[in-house]
Amino acid sequence: MPTAIVTQSSGRIVHVRLVSSDTTDTTVAPEAVALAAESGTGAAETTAVVAAPNPIAPTPKEIFWSAGSFFVLLIVMRYYLFPKLKKGMDARYADIRSDIEGADSVKAAAQTDVAGYEKQLAAVRVEAAGRIDAARQTVDTERNAQLAQVNARIASARADADAQTAAARAAAQGQVAAAVAQVATKAATMASGRTPDASVVQAAVAAAMESAGSR
Amino acid sequence: MIALDFPEINSILVWKDLFPSFNKIALIAVLAAVISITIFLLAVRQDHKEAPKGIRNFAEVIVEFIEDGVVMQTMGKDGLAWTPFLMTMFLFIYLCNVPGIIPFFQMPATARMAVPLFLALMVWVIYNVTGIKHQGLLGYFKSTLFPPGVPKALYILVTPIEFISAIIVRPFSLAVRLFANMMAGHILLVTFALLSEALFQAKDKILIPVGILPFFMLVFLTSFEVLVAFLQAYIFAMLTAVYIGGATHPEH
Protein backbone atom coordinates (compact mmCIF):
# COMPACT_ATOMS: atom_id res chain seq x y z
CA MET A 1 0.00 0.00 0.00
CA PRO A 2 1.50 3.38 -0.90
CA THR A 3 2.19 5.96 1.78
CA ALA A 4 2.12 9.69 1.30
CA ILE A 5 5.32 11.35 2.44
CA VAL A 6 5.12 15.07 2.96
CA THR A 7 8.35 17.03 3.07
CA GLN A 8 8.25 20.30 4.97
CA SER A 9 10.68 23.13 5.22
CA SER A 10 10.06 25.90 7.77
CA GLY A 11 6.48 24.73 8.16
CA ARG A 12 5.76 24.87 4.43
CA ILE A 13 4.95 21.75 2.44
CA VAL A 14 7.59 21.56 -0.27
CA HIS A 15 7.14 18.02 -1.57
CA VAL A 16 4.59 15.23 -1.47
CA ARG A 17 5.41 11.74 -2.68
CA LEU A 18 3.67 8.36 -2.67
CA VAL A 19 6.06 5.59 -1.70
CA SER A 20 5.86 1.95 -0.76
CA SER A 21 7.33 0.70 2.52
CA ASP A 22 10.29 -0.99 0.74
CA THR A 23 11.42 2.25 -0.88
CA THR A 24 15.09 2.95 -1.46
CA ASP A 25 14.57 6.66 -1.81
CA THR A 26 17.32 8.22 0.24
CA THR A 27 15.45 11.46 0.66
CA VAL A 28 13.08 9.77 3.07
CA ALA A 29 14.05 8.14 6.32
CA PRO A 30 13.04 4.43 6.10
CA GLU A 31 11.82 4.49 9.69
CA ALA A 32 9.44 7.29 8.80
CA VAL A 33 8.09 5.27 5.91
CA ALA A 34 7.66 2.25 8.16
CA LEU A 35 6.00 4.36 10.83
CA ALA A 36 3.66 5.87 8.31
CA ALA A 37 2.82 2.50 6.82
CA GLU A 38 2.13 0.91 10.23
CA SER A 39 0.06 3.68 11.73
CA GLY A 40 -2.53 4.06 9.02
CA THR A 41 -4.70 2.12 6.65
CA GLY A 42 -4.13 4.03 3.46
CA ALA A 43 -2.67 6.98 1.70
CA ALA A 44 -5.71 9.12 2.37
CA GLU A 45 -5.44 8.74 6.14
CA THR A 46 -1.67 8.54 6.69
CA THR A 47 0.70 11.46 6.46
CA ALA A 48 4.28 11.27 7.71
CA VAL A 49 5.99 14.60 7.90
CA VAL A 50 9.71 14.15 7.38
CA ALA A 51 12.30 16.90 6.93
CA ALA A 52 14.50 16.04 3.94
CA PRO A 53 18.23 16.14 4.63
CA ASN A 54 19.82 19.40 3.72
CA PRO A 55 21.67 18.82 0.45
CA ILE A 56 24.35 21.32 1.43
CA ALA A 57 24.95 20.35 5.04
CA PRO A 58 28.06 18.21 5.59
CA THR A 59 27.48 14.79 7.08
CA PRO A 60 29.78 13.47 9.82
CA LYS A 61 30.52 10.19 8.03
CA GLU A 62 31.68 12.04 4.90
CA ILE A 63 33.87 14.33 7.00
CA PHE A 64 35.28 11.33 8.83
CA TRP A 65 36.14 9.37 5.68
CA SER A 66 37.50 12.37 3.76
CA ALA A 67 39.58 13.52 6.74
CA GLY A 68 40.84 9.99 7.36
CA SER A 69 41.76 9.46 3.71
CA PHE A 70 43.45 12.84 3.50
CA PHE A 71 45.52 12.35 6.64
CA VAL A 72 46.60 8.85 5.60
CA LEU A 73 47.63 10.21 2.21
CA LEU A 74 49.39 13.18 3.83
CA ILE A 75 51.33 11.04 6.28
CA VAL A 76 52.41 8.50 3.64
CA MET A 77 53.29 11.30 1.23
CA ARG A 78 55.08 13.48 3.80
CA TYR A 79 57.15 10.80 5.50
CA TYR A 80 57.78 8.20 2.80
CA LEU A 81 56.76 8.81 -0.82
CA PHE A 82 57.69 12.45 -1.32
CA PRO A 83 61.11 12.28 0.41
CA LYS A 84 62.02 9.14 -1.53
CA LEU A 85 60.91 10.58 -4.87
CA LYS A 86 62.55 13.93 -4.16
CA LYS A 87 65.76 12.26 -3.04
CA GLY A 88 65.91 10.36 -6.34
CA MET A 89 65.16 13.54 -8.30
CA ASP A 90 67.84 15.50 -6.42
CA ALA A 91 70.39 12.70 -6.90
CA ARG A 92 69.68 12.58 -10.63
CA TYR A 93 69.83 16.37 -10.94
CA ALA A 94 73.13 16.34 -9.02
CA ASP A 95 74.46 13.71 -11.46
CA ILE A 96 73.29 15.79 -14.39
CA ARG A 97 74.86 18.93 -12.89
CA SER A 98 78.10 17.03 -12.23
CA ASP A 99 78.09 15.69 -15.82
CA ILE A 100 77.48 19.19 -17.15
CA GLU A 101 80.30 20.57 -15.00
CA GLY A 102 82.57 17.70 -16.21
CA ALA A 103 81.62 18.46 -19.79
CA ASP A 104 82.29 22.15 -19.16
CA SER A 105 85.75 21.40 -17.74
CA VAL A 106 86.54 19.08 -20.68
CA LYS A 107 85.33 21.78 -23.03
CA ALA A 108 87.49 24.39 -21.24
CA ALA A 109 90.52 22.06 -21.45
CA ALA A 110 89.85 21.47 -25.15
CA GLN A 111 89.52 25.21 -25.68
CA THR A 112 92.85 25.70 -23.87
CA ASP A 113 94.45 23.05 -26.09
CA VAL A 114 93.00 24.66 -29.19
CA ALA A 115 94.27 28.07 -28.03
CA GLY A 116 97.77 26.58 -27.42
CA TYR A 117 97.71 24.90 -30.81
CA GLU A 118 96.63 28.12 -32.49
CA LYS A 119 99.36 30.00 -30.63
CA GLN A 120 101.97 27.49 -31.78
CA LEU A 121 100.55 27.60 -35.29
CA ALA A 122 100.80 31.39 -35.29
CA ALA A 123 104.43 31.21 -34.06
CA VAL A 124 105.28 28.65 -36.74
CA ARG A 125 103.59 30.86 -39.34
CA VAL A 126 105.58 33.89 -38.13
CA GLU A 127 108.79 31.87 -38.22
CA ALA A 128 107.97 30.53 -41.69
CA ALA A 129 107.21 34.04 -42.91
CA GLY A 130 110.55 35.24 -41.45
CA ARG A 131 112.39 32.43 -43.15
CA ILE A 132 110.65 33.12 -46.42
CA ASP A 133 111.53 36.83 -46.13
CA ALA A 134 115.14 36.00 -45.34
CA ALA A 135 115.31 33.59 -48.26
CA ARG A 136 113.71 36.18 -50.50
CA GLN A 137 116.24 38.80 -49.36
CA THR A 138 119.09 36.37 -49.94
CA VAL A 139 117.77 35.55 -53.38
CA ASP A 140 117.31 39.25 -54.13
CA THR A 141 120.82 40.05 -52.94
CA GLU A 142 122.30 37.23 -54.99
CA ARG A 143 120.25 38.23 -58.00
CA ASN A 144 121.27 41.86 -57.65
CA ALA A 145 124.90 40.88 -57.29
CA GLN A 146 124.73 38.63 -60.34
CA LEU A 147 122.88 41.32 -62.26
CA ALA A 148 125.58 43.83 -61.29
CA GLN A 149 128.29 41.42 -62.44
CA VAL A 150 126.48 40.75 -65.70
CA ASN A 151 125.86 44.48 -66.22
CA ALA A 152 129.53 45.18 -65.49
CA ARG A 153 130.58 42.54 -68.03
CA ILE A 154 128.15 43.94 -70.57
CA ALA A 155 129.40 47.50 -69.89
CA SER A 156 133.00 46.35 -70.23
CA ALA A 157 132.25 44.52 -73.48
CA ARG A 158 130.31 47.52 -74.77
CA ALA A 159 133.20 49.86 -73.85
CA ASP A 160 135.64 47.54 -75.65
CA ALA A 161 133.36 47.44 -78.68
CA ASP A 162 132.96 51.23 -78.58
CA ALA A 163 136.72 51.68 -78.38
CA GLN A 164 137.24 49.32 -81.28
CA THR A 165 134.51 51.10 -83.23
CA ALA A 166 136.07 54.50 -82.44
CA ALA A 167 139.50 53.26 -83.45
CA ALA A 168 138.12 51.78 -86.65
CA ARG A 169 136.22 54.97 -87.34
CA ALA A 170 139.27 57.09 -86.62
CA ALA A 171 141.37 54.87 -88.93
CA ALA A 172 138.70 55.04 -91.61
CA GLN A 173 138.39 58.84 -91.20
CA GLY A 174 142.21 59.19 -91.59
CA GLN A 175 142.14 57.11 -94.73
CA VAL A 176 139.11 58.98 -96.09
CA ALA A 177 140.74 62.35 -95.21
CA ALA A 178 143.97 61.31 -96.92
CA ALA A 179 142.11 60.10 -99.99
CA VAL A 180 139.92 63.25 -100.10
CA ALA A 181 143.02 65.43 -99.63
CA GLN A 182 144.76 63.56 -102.43
CA VAL A 183 141.74 63.93 -104.68
CA ALA A 184 141.36 67.57 -103.74
CA THR A 185 145.05 68.24 -104.32
CA LYS A 186 144.87 66.56 -107.73
CA ALA A 187 141.75 68.43 -108.61
CA ALA A 188 143.23 71.76 -107.55
CA THR A 189 146.44 70.96 -109.39
CA MET A 190 144.62 70.12 -112.53
CA ALA A 191 142.43 73.17 -112.23
CA SER A 192 145.03 75.75 -111.30
CA GLY A 193 148.20 74.12 -112.52
CA ARG A 194 149.71 74.54 -109.18
CA THR A 195 149.93 72.15 -106.35
CA PRO A 196 148.13 73.50 -103.26
CA ASP A 197 149.74 73.49 -99.86
CA ALA A 198 149.18 70.08 -98.32
CA SER A 199 148.47 71.47 -94.85
CA VAL A 200 145.80 73.81 -96.22
CA VAL A 201 144.17 70.97 -98.10
CA GLN A 202 144.25 68.73 -95.05
CA ALA A 203 142.80 71.54 -92.90
CA ALA A 204 139.99 72.15 -95.40
CA VAL A 205 139.25 68.44 -95.67
CA ALA A 206 139.22 68.09 -91.90
CA ALA A 207 136.86 71.09 -91.58
CA ALA A 208 134.53 69.70 -94.23
CA MET A 209 134.41 66.27 -92.63
CA GLU A 210 133.86 67.75 -89.23
CA SER A 211 130.96 69.86 -90.47
CA ALA A 212 129.52 66.85 -92.27
CA GLY A 213 129.87 64.71 -89.14
CA SER A 214 128.16 67.34 -87.00
CA ARG A 215 125.07 67.51 -89.28
CA MET B 1 4.71 18.40 -25.45
CA ILE B 2 7.43 17.13 -23.12
CA ALA B 3 7.43 16.28 -19.44
CA LEU B 4 10.80 16.63 -17.82
CA ASP B 5 10.81 14.99 -14.41
CA PHE B 6 13.78 16.60 -12.69
CA PRO B 7 14.81 14.53 -9.68
CA GLU B 8 14.87 15.94 -6.20
CA ILE B 9 18.11 17.68 -5.39
CA ASN B 10 18.88 15.17 -2.65
CA SER B 11 18.65 12.25 -5.04
CA ILE B 12 21.57 13.63 -7.07
CA LEU B 13 23.67 14.83 -4.12
CA VAL B 14 22.94 12.60 -1.13
CA TRP B 15 23.99 8.99 -1.57
CA LYS B 16 22.81 5.97 0.30
CA ASP B 17 25.36 3.89 2.17
CA LEU B 18 27.25 1.17 0.30
CA PHE B 19 27.79 -0.34 3.73
CA PRO B 20 27.16 1.24 7.13
CA SER B 21 28.55 4.79 7.27
CA PHE B 22 30.33 4.38 3.95
CA ASN B 23 28.74 5.99 0.90
CA LYS B 24 29.92 7.02 -2.55
CA ILE B 25 31.57 10.19 -1.23
CA ALA B 26 33.57 8.15 1.27
CA LEU B 27 34.49 5.71 -1.50
CA ILE B 28 35.74 8.53 -3.73
CA ALA B 29 37.78 10.03 -0.86
CA VAL B 30 39.35 6.67 -0.05
CA LEU B 31 40.04 5.99 -3.74
CA ALA B 32 41.65 9.43 -4.10
CA ALA B 33 44.11 8.52 -1.35
CA VAL B 34 44.68 4.99 -2.67
CA ILE B 35 45.25 6.15 -6.26
CA SER B 36 47.68 8.87 -5.16
CA ILE B 37 49.63 6.45 -2.98
CA THR B 38 49.69 3.85 -5.77
CA ILE B 39 50.97 6.32 -8.37
CA PHE B 40 53.78 7.50 -6.12
CA LEU B 41 54.59 4.00 -4.89
CA LEU B 42 55.02 2.81 -8.48
CA ALA B 43 57.02 5.95 -9.23
CA VAL B 44 59.51 5.55 -6.36
CA ARG B 45 60.07 1.89 -7.26
CA GLN B 46 61.60 2.89 -10.60
CA ASP B 47 65.33 3.53 -10.89
CA HIS B 48 65.86 7.21 -10.16
CA LYS B 49 69.19 7.33 -12.00
CA GLU B 50 67.59 6.69 -15.38
CA ALA B 51 65.72 9.36 -17.27
CA PRO B 52 62.19 9.36 -15.83
CA LYS B 53 59.49 7.84 -17.99
CA GLY B 54 55.95 6.59 -17.57
CA ILE B 55 54.51 6.87 -14.11
CA ARG B 56 57.71 8.22 -12.53
CA ASN B 57 57.75 11.01 -15.09
CA PHE B 58 54.11 11.72 -14.25
CA ALA B 59 54.85 11.85 -10.50
CA GLU B 60 57.89 14.09 -11.03
CA VAL B 61 55.84 16.42 -13.22
CA ILE B 62 53.32 16.77 -10.38
CA VAL B 63 56.09 17.51 -7.88
CA GLU B 64 57.68 20.10 -10.16
CA PHE B 65 54.31 21.62 -10.96
CA ILE B 66 53.61 22.14 -7.26
CA GLU B 67 57.13 23.40 -6.56
CA ASP B 68 57.39 25.77 -9.53
CA GLY B 69 53.75 26.60 -10.13
CA VAL B 70 52.51 26.96 -6.57
CA VAL B 71 55.25 27.15 -3.91
CA MET B 72 57.84 29.26 -5.72
CA GLN B 73 55.16 31.64 -7.01
CA THR B 74 53.69 32.33 -3.61
CA MET B 75 56.15 31.43 -0.83
CA GLY B 76 59.57 31.34 -2.45
CA LYS B 77 62.34 28.92 -1.52
CA ASP B 78 61.44 29.04 2.17
CA GLY B 79 58.11 27.45 1.34
CA LEU B 80 59.53 24.32 -0.31
CA ALA B 81 59.02 22.41 2.94
CA TRP B 82 55.28 22.79 2.32
CA THR B 83 55.47 20.99 -1.05
CA PRO B 84 54.32 17.55 0.24
CA PHE B 85 51.33 19.10 2.02
CA LEU B 86 50.29 21.23 -0.95
CA MET B 87 50.85 18.36 -3.37
CA THR B 88 48.74 16.06 -1.21
CA MET B 89 46.01 18.68 -1.10
CA PHE B 90 46.14 19.24 -4.86
CA LEU B 91 46.07 15.52 -5.66
CA PHE B 92 43.33 14.76 -3.15
CA ILE B 93 41.06 17.57 -4.37
CA TYR B 94 41.71 16.77 -8.03
CA LEU B 95 40.95 13.10 -7.54
CA CYS B 96 37.83 14.00 -5.59
CA ASN B 97 36.74 16.37 -8.40
CA VAL B 98 37.38 14.13 -11.37
CA PRO B 99 34.84 11.36 -10.56
CA GLY B 100 32.16 13.90 -11.52
CA ILE B 101 32.78 12.96 -15.15
CA ILE B 102 33.76 9.32 -14.69
CA PRO B 103 30.97 6.87 -15.59
CA PHE B 104 29.48 4.92 -12.67
CA PHE B 105 30.81 7.51 -10.19
CA GLN B 106 29.37 10.62 -11.86
CA MET B 107 29.68 12.58 -8.65
CA PRO B 108 32.52 14.77 -7.47
CA ALA B 109 33.12 14.19 -3.77
CA THR B 110 33.77 17.93 -3.43
CA ALA B 111 30.17 18.62 -4.50
CA ARG B 112 29.30 17.62 -0.94
CA MET B 113 30.23 20.22 1.67
CA ALA B 114 32.04 17.72 3.91
CA VAL B 115 35.25 17.52 1.89
CA PRO B 116 35.72 21.26 1.11
CA LEU B 117 34.71 22.25 4.63
CA PHE B 118 37.15 19.85 6.26
CA LEU B 119 39.98 20.96 3.96
CA ALA B 120 39.21 24.66 4.42
CA LEU B 121 39.06 24.38 8.21
CA MET B 122 42.33 22.44 8.20
CA VAL B 123 43.95 25.18 6.10
CA TRP B 124 42.52 27.81 8.44
CA VAL B 125 44.04 26.08 11.47
CA ILE B 126 47.36 25.55 9.69
CA TYR B 127 47.90 29.11 8.48
CA ASN B 128 46.84 30.62 11.81
CA VAL B 129 49.06 28.25 13.82
CA THR B 130 51.96 28.81 11.38
CA GLY B 131 51.50 32.58 11.60
CA ILE B 132 51.46 32.52 15.41
CA LYS B 133 54.49 30.20 15.43
CA HIS B 134 56.50 32.49 13.14
CA GLN B 135 55.45 35.88 14.47
CA GLY B 136 54.11 35.17 17.94
CA LEU B 137 50.49 35.66 18.91
CA LEU B 138 50.66 39.46 19.12
CA GLY B 139 52.87 39.82 16.09
CA TYR B 140 50.59 37.66 13.97
CA PHE B 141 47.43 39.47 14.91
CA LYS B 142 49.18 42.83 14.58
CA SER B 143 50.40 42.04 11.05
CA THR B 144 47.02 40.57 10.11
CA LEU B 145 44.69 43.13 11.64
CA PHE B 146 46.85 46.25 11.35
CA PRO B 147 48.32 46.25 7.86
CA PRO B 148 51.31 48.62 7.61
CA GLY B 149 51.08 51.81 5.58
CA VAL B 150 47.49 52.53 6.55
CA PRO B 151 46.76 55.87 8.30
CA LYS B 152 46.07 55.17 11.97
CA ALA B 153 42.59 56.70 11.87
CA LEU B 154 41.57 54.20 9.21
CA TYR B 155 42.37 51.24 11.48
CA ILE B 156 38.92 51.75 13.01
CA LEU B 157 37.52 50.72 9.65
CA VAL B 158 40.30 48.48 8.34
CA THR B 159 40.88 46.28 11.39
CA PRO B 160 37.33 44.86 11.64
CA ILE B 161 37.32 44.33 7.86
CA GLU B 162 40.68 42.50 8.04
CA PHE B 163 39.45 40.44 10.97
CA ILE B 164 36.33 39.37 9.13
CA SER B 165 38.23 38.84 5.90
CA ALA B 166 41.28 36.97 7.18
CA ILE B 167 39.94 35.15 10.21
CA ILE B 168 36.28 34.46 9.49
CA VAL B 169 35.54 34.64 5.77
CA ARG B 170 38.64 32.94 4.36
CA PRO B 171 37.82 29.35 5.33
CA PHE B 172 34.24 29.73 4.14
CA SER B 173 35.20 31.36 0.87
CA LEU B 174 37.75 28.60 0.33
CA ALA B 175 35.20 25.88 1.05
CA VAL B 176 32.27 27.47 -0.77
CA ARG B 177 34.31 28.25 -3.90
CA LEU B 178 35.25 24.61 -4.35
CA PHE B 179 31.91 23.19 -3.24
CA ALA B 180 29.76 25.57 -5.29
CA ASN B 181 31.78 25.16 -8.46
CA MET B 182 31.70 21.39 -8.30
CA MET B 183 28.04 21.17 -7.28
CA ALA B 184 27.02 23.60 -10.03
CA GLY B 185 28.94 21.55 -12.57
CA HIS B 186 27.33 18.36 -11.33
CA ILE B 187 23.82 19.82 -11.49
CA LEU B 188 24.46 21.21 -14.97
CA LEU B 189 25.60 17.80 -16.19
CA VAL B 190 22.54 16.16 -14.66
CA THR B 191 20.26 18.80 -16.19
CA PHE B 192 21.58 18.43 -19.71
CA ALA B 193 21.75 14.64 -19.45
CA LEU B 194 18.08 14.51 -18.38
CA LEU B 195 17.06 17.00 -21.05
CA SER B 196 18.89 15.03 -23.74
CA GLU B 197 17.26 11.80 -22.56
CA ALA B 198 13.80 13.36 -22.39
CA LEU B 199 14.09 14.80 -25.90
CA PHE B 200 15.55 11.62 -27.42
CA GLN B 201 12.67 9.62 -25.91
CA ALA B 202 9.94 12.17 -26.60
CA LYS B 203 6.67 10.79 -27.95
CA ASP B 204 6.48 13.70 -30.34
CA LYS B 205 8.95 12.56 -33.04
CA ILE B 206 9.74 16.10 -34.11
CA LEU B 207 11.46 16.71 -30.76
CA ILE B 208 13.92 13.85 -31.12
CA PRO B 209 16.42 15.71 -33.40
CA VAL B 210 16.29 18.69 -31.05
CA GLY B 211 17.84 16.45 -28.41
CA ILE B 212 21.18 16.83 -30.16
CA LEU B 213 21.48 20.40 -28.82
CA PRO B 214 21.47 19.57 -25.08
CA PHE B 215 23.55 16.50 -25.91
CA PHE B 216 26.26 18.70 -27.48
CA MET B 217 26.03 20.96 -24.45
CA LEU B 218 26.44 17.90 -22.23
CA VAL B 219 29.58 16.85 -24.13
CA PHE B 220 30.94 20.40 -23.93
CA LEU B 221 30.20 20.68 -20.20
CA THR B 222 31.81 17.31 -19.56
CA SER B 223 35.00 18.56 -21.24
CA PHE B 224 34.68 21.81 -19.32
CA GLU B 225 34.41 19.89 -16.05
CA VAL B 226 37.80 18.28 -16.79
CA LEU B 227 39.25 21.78 -16.78
CA VAL B 228 37.20 22.87 -13.76
CA ALA B 229 38.34 19.81 -11.77
CA PHE B 230 41.99 20.74 -12.36
CA LEU B 231 41.45 24.47 -11.95
CA GLN B 232 39.61 24.20 -8.63
CA ALA B 233 42.29 21.89 -7.20
CA TYR B 234 44.98 24.31 -8.39
CA ILE B 235 43.16 27.36 -6.99
CA PHE B 236 42.64 25.68 -3.62
CA ALA B 237 46.31 24.67 -3.39
CA MET B 238 47.44 28.10 -4.59
CA LEU B 239 45.28 29.98 -2.06
CA THR B 240 46.46 27.65 0.70
CA ALA B 241 50.05 28.50 -0.25
CA VAL B 242 49.21 32.22 -0.36
CA TYR B 243 47.61 32.11 3.11
CA ILE B 244 50.47 30.14 4.64
CA GLY B 245 53.04 32.34 2.88
CA GLY B 246 51.25 35.45 4.12
CA ALA B 247 51.21 34.10 7.66
CA THR B 248 54.94 33.25 7.64
CA HIS B 249 56.15 36.32 5.72
CA PRO B 250 53.66 39.15 6.33
CA GLU B 251 56.04 41.70 4.73
CA HIS B 252 55.39 40.05 1.35
Image: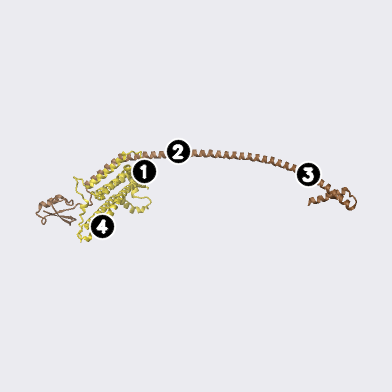
Which chain hosts label 2? A
Frontmost of labels 4 and 2 is: 4
Q: Which amino acid does label 1 sit on?
A: Asp
Pointers 4 and 2 in contact (C-beta within 8 Å): no
- Asked if B199 appears above or below A139 in the picture, the reply is below
Frontmost of labels 2 and 3 is: 3
A69 displayed left or right of A21: right
Pointers 2 and 3 in contact (C-beta within 8 Å): no
Q: How crowded is mark 1: few (under 14 residues within 10 Å), some or many (20 or more)?
A: few
Q: Which amino acid does label 3 sit on?
A: Ala
Residue highlighted by disc 2: A106
Establish whether labels 4 and 2 are both on one chain: no
Q: How crowded is mark 4: few (under 14 residues within 10 Å), some or many (20 or more)?
A: some
Frontmost of labels 1 and 3 is: 3
Mark carried by residue B212: 4
Which chain hosts label 1? B
Establish whether labels 1 and 2 are both on one chain: no
**Mark 1 element type:** helix
The answer to which quarter of the image holds residue A90 is top left
Q: Indicate the colouring scheme.
A: by chain
Which chain hosts label 3? A
Residue highlighted by disc 1: B78
Q: Residues within 10 Å of mark 2 (few under 14, many from 20)?
A: few
Letter of the chain shown yellow in the rendering: B
- Asked if A167 appears above or below B152 in the picture, the reply is above
Establish whether labels 4 and 3 are both on one chain: no
Letter of the chain shown brown in the rendering: A
How far apart marks 4 and 2 lie (CA) works out to: 66 Å
The answer to which quarter of the image holds residue B195 is bottom left
Residue highlighted by disc 3: A168
Q: Which amino acid does label 2 sit on?
A: Val
